[in-house]
Image: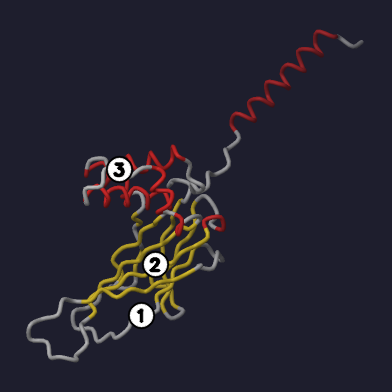
Amino acid sequence: MHDPIIAARGWRQAVALSAAVVLVAPAAPRAIRRDLGTEDLQRAIKVGGSSEAERARFHSAYIVPLRVADAAIQQLEVLTEFRRVAIEATDRLRKGDHMFGAGQADSAMRPWHDKLTLVLRLRFHPQNVLVNVPPYELAIGEPGPTPLDVRRLPVLSLTGTGQRPGTPTPMYGATVEADFDVVAVRPGPQAVRVVLQGKEVARTTINFTQID
């Protein structure tokens, strides 16, 4: 015989079990913040105007340890639109501009909208004979998105008083910047590799869920 009390009790247990499953189900990874609104911009500006210790703590989350097989590689860091606003705010304050607000930040960030940039810093042996920056490449994921743009910028030594006219200025370092479409970068941990002439020379993992 059908017992309505037992049936109701079973229904309540099923509902409770379903609710428990919903509560323990893992949340979807958060993507990198984009389409920054006024509150996001103001928060980034506040970071840029905070104390040196607070800024160092913020930026440390974007500087990534590497497993390196190339002595020239010094550091890898991530530039997001949010972090660029914080850096811009700091620079403006150092120049005495205390009027930098969300409107100015939005205008300044238009070239970087929806872009994530990996920045590789290199330092070469003092006796190197390099003329151009070696063709280091940066890759996210295996496979992953193709960079939108790559810039290889030399860092040149200061010209010495004894340097003969016409001789090239020594290159003691370089910066390699690779821009990616932020929408194409999957949230969560992703392998990031540094490649030189088809050979992997450094590797790390970046959790893109943990940065703005």
Instruction: Please tell me which of labels 3 and 1 falls first in the chain.
Output: 3
User: Residue 119 bears which disc, if any?
Assistant: none
Instruction: Please tell me which of labels 1 and 2 falls first in the chain.
Output: 1
Q: Mark 3 or mark 2, which is nearer to you?
A: 3
Look at mark 3 in the image and give the residue it sits on. 99
Q: Which residue type does callout 1 highlight?
A: Pro
Look at mark 1 in the image and give the residue it sits on. 134
Tag 3 and tag 1, C-beta contact below 8 Å: no
Q: Which residue type does callout 2 highlight?
A: Glu
Q: Nearer the viewer, residue 88 or 154?
A: 88
Q: Nearer the viewer, residue 46 or 130?
A: 46
Look at mark 2 in the image and give the residue it sits on. 177
The residue most toward the left is 161
User: x and y percent of residue 184 in the render?
Assistant: 56, 58
Establish if 81 lies above or below 119: above
Instruction: Give the CA separation, mark 1 to mark 2.
Output: 13 Å
User: x and y percent of residue 100 in the render?
Assistant: 32, 45
Dot 1 lies on which element?
Answer: loop
Q: Mark 1 or mark 2, which is nearer to you?
A: 2
